[in-house]
Amino acid sequence: MMKWIVPFILTGVFTLGCSSKVSTLDLEAEEASNSLSKPSASSVESISRQSEEPAETCSSTKNGLRVLVTLNSAEPLKCRDNTRRDPARAVGPACPGGLTISNVTSSAAWVDCTDVQVCGKAPKSKTDLASHPSSRMTQLDFADLPWGCTGDLEWAPADQTANAAAIKKVVIDITPPPCPICTTTGLRTCEICGSDGVPPVIKEVIPEVGACSQFKIVVFAEDKESGLHRDAYSIDAGATWQSSNEFTVPGVNLNLAGSNVRVRDRAGNITQWPKTLTLTAPPCPCNAPWGEKVPHGETRTVFKSATVTCAQTCESVARTCNNGVLSGSADGQFSECKVQGCPKCNLPWGDQIEHGQSVTAFEQPNVTCADQCRSTVLSCDRGNLVGPASTYASKACQFSKPSCNCTFEGSVIAHGGSKTVYATPQVACGETCQPQTVTCNLGNLSGATSSKNLSCTPRECKCTTSWGQKLDLNQEIDAFKSATLACDQSLSCQDAANRIRIKCNNVQTNEITLVQGTGTVADFKQPSCSIPACACEHLGRFLKPTDPPMSVYKIDKAIPPATCKMQGNVGTVRCVKVGANFNVQGDTNTALYKFAACEDVAGGGNSSENVGAGTGGGTGGGVGNDDGEGEGFRRRSKGVSRGCDVNSYPYVCASFDFRTISADAGGYCRVPGTNGFTALPTDINDLSGRIEPKGFFTTFSQKEVACGDSCSRYAKLGICLQGHLSTKDTHPYSDCREVCP
């Protein structure tokens, strides 16, 4: 790793008499101001500083100098740059690959001390720190002075520059730190010391929003072998390199590919950053010439002139801020424009107003209520009064009441207006609401002020039940005490204890009377009654706890040789009462057992399945012919005139003659029974319970399961392979049933 160093910061003080001096002391503004509160003693001092940790020069080390000049107007100073390249140092690198020693071109001319150069370079900045009626303090900052520069910064009173005894000096010595020593050769060098094939390591790359429309990218890297290159950092894929690990990038949106960020070492090894840098910076406001900082995106209407004569017009322009740049005409530089030199306007009541001013004028000088004060605006335009000055000729309007309006039952009635009111909010069925009037005059109410209702509606000529139903006169309906009864109680909805019949007897008084049944009408508040079934609902069917289990099916149509009742297709569910609830148990998975019924579809002659009862007969097997038009079929055999009956157990048929196939050749398999596998029949012609090679059959690992469990959990499809059913050892049963009490 290479270290940074500030090798030379020169500090000195030049003083003449009690007022003029030159110094490089770093003063705060307050200290500088205090130092000028009274004349200071004459003195000269020089302070050299160096960083606490010496750094290798293989990095682009910076240097700088700060000079503080205090001048008294009564005793001016002159300064000159008396520096040169150290003759002991040759032009070129201080060591192989190190910092460069440059020639120094300085001027021997005496100049004002605030304009002096050091090592042939002008100050990077000048800052006035403080001033006094007779003194001024200026700070000069120098940067990047030539390495190897040596000599003096000389100063003297302006009238004594030829007097060698009067010349004061500050020593200048811009000496680069020593180059690092290569441990293998013992020589100082910034070039590769030994072999280095290891690229540098980029530890982190941090993008930051530096300012409006500007980003700062900081790269952190190290190289523990040959060290980082003097100009180690790049963010343009190596097109340019710099010594600083900080970059400033303009723009609003940063989207920099990680491969553009690169770091190199002195051996030439380069590392790329793998991550894309993305960030958004806020757009810049605009510093407007009229003194305002206009936010991005906002528009201002401004003027081309600050003032115009009475015969001229203020010309305006619109200027919009777009990321620090104002659009529109550059002539628009003034936030306001005043018309000058115009005559004043005479007001009806004797006053005058300037051009551009306006006043409020009233129609009447005196009124009863404040809301009778009608007003307008009169304005002055280049000596002409604009507005109905003949109608509105009063400067003020006096009133005795704050308002001429009236308030009645929360409603405002304007002066001269009226409001319709009613004696009652509602009238009897068949009657008409009678409107009355309340009037407002100068804030006073008159008329039917005792009628406090702002609306009125006739009562509906119907009775209303306790549950809100409307009944015509003499209309009868049933009413119930309870809306729902338990399914297992003896009381029914129609029992006299639960039902009565009521009638609308008087619509005026909403009288509802009992027509049938016993009890009080107020106790029967339900319009209907129902009794839920004491059963479970499953797949659209109701099942009572006392009913036998209901069969459910995976398919709703079975095409031979399949049947609805074949193993694996049928499940069962039953209804169980738990407390007051009725729950379905068993094969309740409706995604698997979707149907409550299943239909066995009969075959038909030459169907695609070649099964089922057809016409004809012959040697095809069973009652069929050679083309399979019957209960059996021949064409799935191997030429022997024997088929098999697919309409009876086990509902499968071999496609060859078992008598010609041995088990060793991959022959048939035995179908399991309800109690497990049994021995094959000894009669080779007995084809019952056999499966052809690669045929399949649904088998179960359990032949009985507990009540509420599902047999489908224990089912698996067995395949006949090499004379053995694949599920023989784990699923030895052909059927399974749920055992319930």
Image (spheres, helix red, strand yellow):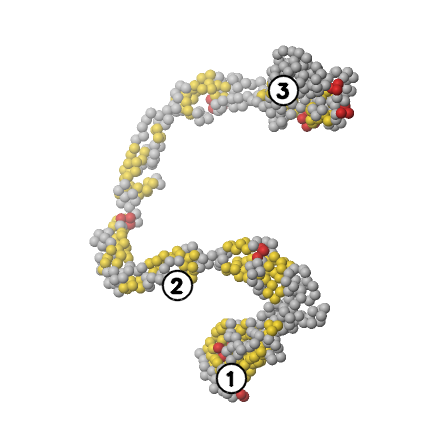
- Amino acid type at mark 1: Ala
Q: Secondary structure at mark 3?
A: loop
CA–CA distance between discs 3 and 1?
Answer: 124 Å
In the rendered image, which residue does mark 3 sit on?
609
In the rendered image, which residue does mark 2 sit on?
289
Q: Secondary structure at mark 1?
A: strand
In the rendered image, which residue does mark 1 sit on?
156
Compared with 53, 577 (above or below) is above
CA–CA distance between discs 1 and 2?
Answer: 45 Å
Mark closer to the chain start, 2 or 3: 2
At label 2, counting other C-alpha atoms closer than 10 Å, the crowd grade (few under 14, some 14-19, many 20 or more) is some
> Does residue 188 appear in this view?
yes
Left or right of residue 442: residue 158: right
- Amino acid type at mark 2: Pro
Q: Secondary structure at mark 2?
A: loop
Compared with 392, 497 (above or below) is above
Compared with 414, 171 (above or below) is below
The residue at 49%/84% (across/down) is: 157
Residue 502 position by quadrant: top left
Quadrant position of the C terminus in the picture: top right
